[in-house]
Amino acid sequence: MTSGEAPVVVIGGGVIGSAIAYFLTRLQPGCEVVVIERDPTYARASSALSASSIRQQFSTDINIRLSAFGIDFLRQTDTLLACNGETPDIGLHEGGYLYLATPAGASTLRTNHALQRQHGADVALLDVQALQARFPWLAVGDVALGSLGLSGEGWFDGYLLLTALRKKAQSQGVRYLADEAVGLDLTPHGGIQHVQAVRLSSGERLPCRFAVNAAGPWAAAVAAWVGIDLPVVGKRRTVFHVSSPATLAGCPLLIDPSGIWLRPEGNGYICGFAPAADNDADFAPLVPEYDAFDTFVWPTLAERIPGFEALRMQGAWAGYYEMNTFDHNALIGLHPNCDNLLFANGFSGHGLQQCPAVGRGLAEWLLTGAYQSLDLSPLSIQRWVDNQPLLESNVI
């Protein structure tokens, strides 16, 4: 892209949109990029409300490779995203993930472990005796096997990552507009749709060379403007902030067979659970599912961690997962119905950890017409068109 051409217009200024904008202007200084973000406070953004973690323990090649680049990027954010003399500290803590499996799930854990090791992931399988020795505070009577990330996994401050990406992108010339995209100006081009411009609620019309759908839980509304029924919905997820007098030495991010997760946060912990499949958000004010704490989360955690009988909830918040209901993996690239609307949607809870690799890959594609560093084609939106799901067994 050369100076004077219409810009790339990114709809959505969360971590995905900001990562794309950052890499575009890093790889090609002077590249004109405009990011439209209707809420610069990010009050309802998934990027700001996430539990903000990264893992290597996936069951598919592409997701493991995305996270391998992601952890390398996160380890270097203080230099890569340094801006105006400030070096951001996203608080990366490589405390690891610990997956627990009952006898029914042990074989899946072993299969996933073999693939992860093939990609160099620093993970270890722990039998019951090893689990008891390493985590004596765990009750493992129903557990057959554990999988622990020894490095390259952990948690960080997602909001700080978002703001650092945004500031660095702006310092590289990206323009952020506090406005809302409300439609697209389309013309037929070669038998399919072509986006000429993005229309804004302010009345402005932004001509574009490419438009990028990075609208998170609202991605389906943008897709509908070109007649695409995108299988992405907002799913409400609740995070509870809890405290306990119990000390959990070396506590990783624990994934219980029940679907409940827990990790340290400050002087306490945060935890959550996988809600029912019909837990679609209606985009009303986000209200935490408080009842679930007393009826499910607390009792289950108290069985898994006996010291948590005295667990107390200190607060809670709710956020959105932009869930790809087709196969729970990101939908990337062009749809055959439109030749210049690029999709970056449906991350299903993995957006923060995958944003560096996806941002780089889509920037490469926009600048050169092909992926250069990491082939993202396994995540192509074409697989949904062709009804060929990419199945990921490790979905939280």
Image (cartoon, grey):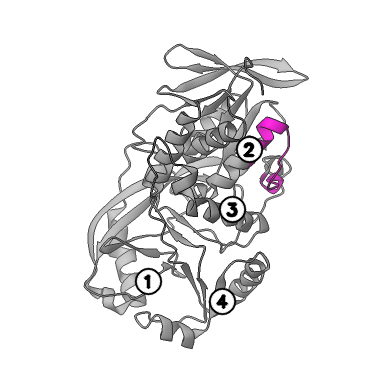
The reply, left or right, for residue 328 in relation to residue 114 is: left
The residue tagged 3 is 69
> Secondary structure beneath disc 3?
helix
Q: Nearer the viewer, mark 4 or mark 3?
A: 3
User: Residue 312 in the image: x percent, y percent?
Assistant: 22, 65
Start and end of the magenta stretch?
A: 361-379
CA distance separating discs 3 and 2: 14 Å
User: Residue 58 in the image: x percent, y percent?
Assistant: 58, 61
Question: Which amino acid lies under the numbered mark 1 shown in the image of this protein?
Answer: Cys
The residue tagged 2 is 362
Name the residue at 46% across, 35% down.
Answer: 168
> Secondary structure beneath disc 1?
loop
Can residue 281 be seen here?
Answer: no
Q: Nearer the viewer, mark 4 or mark 1?
A: 1
Name the residue at 34% across, 54% down.
Answer: 239
Q: Which mark is residue 104?
A: 4
Q: Nearer the viewer, mark 2 or mark 4?
A: 2
Identify whether 217 is placed above or below 90: above
Identify whether 218 is placed above or below 322: above
When asked about the image quadrant of residue 194, the answer is top right
Say whether marks 1 and 3 touch (CB < 8 Å): no
Of the pair 195 and 291, the residue shown nearer to us: 195
Q: Earlier in the sequence, mark 1 or mark 3?
A: 3
CA distance separating discs 1 and 2: 36 Å
User: Residue 381 in the image: x percent, y percent?
Assistant: 67, 40
User: Residue 156 in the image: x percent, y percent?
Assistant: 40, 54
Q: Earlier in the sequence, mark 4 or mark 3?
A: 3
Q: Which mark is residue 396?
A: none
Question: Which amino acid lies under the numbered mark 4 shown in the image of this protein?
Answer: Ala
The residue tagged 1 is 251
